[in-house]
Image (tube, grey):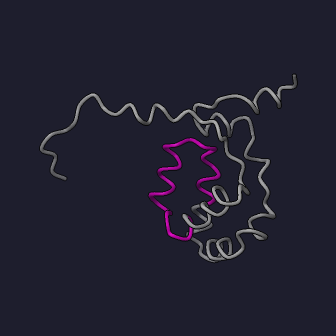
């Protein structure tokens, strides 16, 4: 068994762990143009779109970092590009076996009468 095959079958507890193993570097950059050309052009013709992708790239999968990027640079163009490159065409390799069960644990209490 090689280390690569061992990690290929591993269950990840989040994208950050996956990114630390540099799995995302196996992305097909040519796919951005060949399969998602329209979305890529729309995103990268806008300086804000370039900043959003750069910001997400620096996060290496860490969720709170990605949330900050979306809050600052989120747009329909970014959503469309991510959908095309990650979900629809798998240009960017992300783990299929991420354990998201912690997201469903909820909170032990709620804030009552919260008025923003």
Camera-nearest residue between 28 and 51: 28
Task: Please identify the residue farthest to the top as the structure is shown.
Answer: 1
Relative vertical location of residue 66 with respect to residue 103 in this rendering, above or below: below
Residue 50 rendering spot, x and y as whole percentages = 62, 67
Q: Which quadrant would residue 109 be assigned to in this image?
A: top left
Magenta residues, start to end = 53-78
For image coordinates 75% across by 29% down, the residue present is 7
Residue 31 placement, left or right of 107 = right
For image coordinates 59% across by 55% down, the residue present is 55
Is 61 inside the magenta-drawn segment? Answer: yes
Residue 104 rendering spot, x and y as whole percentages = 41, 35
Is 64 inside the magenta-drawn segment? Answer: yes
Quadrant assignment for the N terminus: top right
Task: Please identify the residue farthest to the right as the structure is shown.
Answer: 2
Residue 46 rendering spot, x and y as whole percentages = 59, 75
Residue 85 rendering spot, x and y as whole percentages = 67, 60
Camera-nearest residue between 101 and 109: 101
């Amino acid at each position: 068994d090689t280390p690569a095959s061992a990690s290929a079958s591993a269950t990840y507890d989040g994208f950050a762990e996956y990114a630390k193993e540099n799995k995302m570097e196996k992305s097909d950059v040519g796919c951005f143009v060949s399969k998602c050309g329209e979305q890529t052009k729309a995103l990268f013709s806008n300086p804000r779109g370039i900043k959003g992708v750069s910001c997400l790239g620096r996060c290496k999968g860490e969720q709170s970092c990605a949330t900050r990027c979306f809050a600052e640079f989120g747009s329909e163009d970014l959503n469309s590009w991510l959908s095309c490159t990650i979900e629809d065409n798998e240009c960017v390799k992300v783990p299929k076996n991420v354990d998201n069960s912690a997201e469903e644990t909820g909170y032990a209490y709620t804030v009552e009468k919260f008025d923003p």
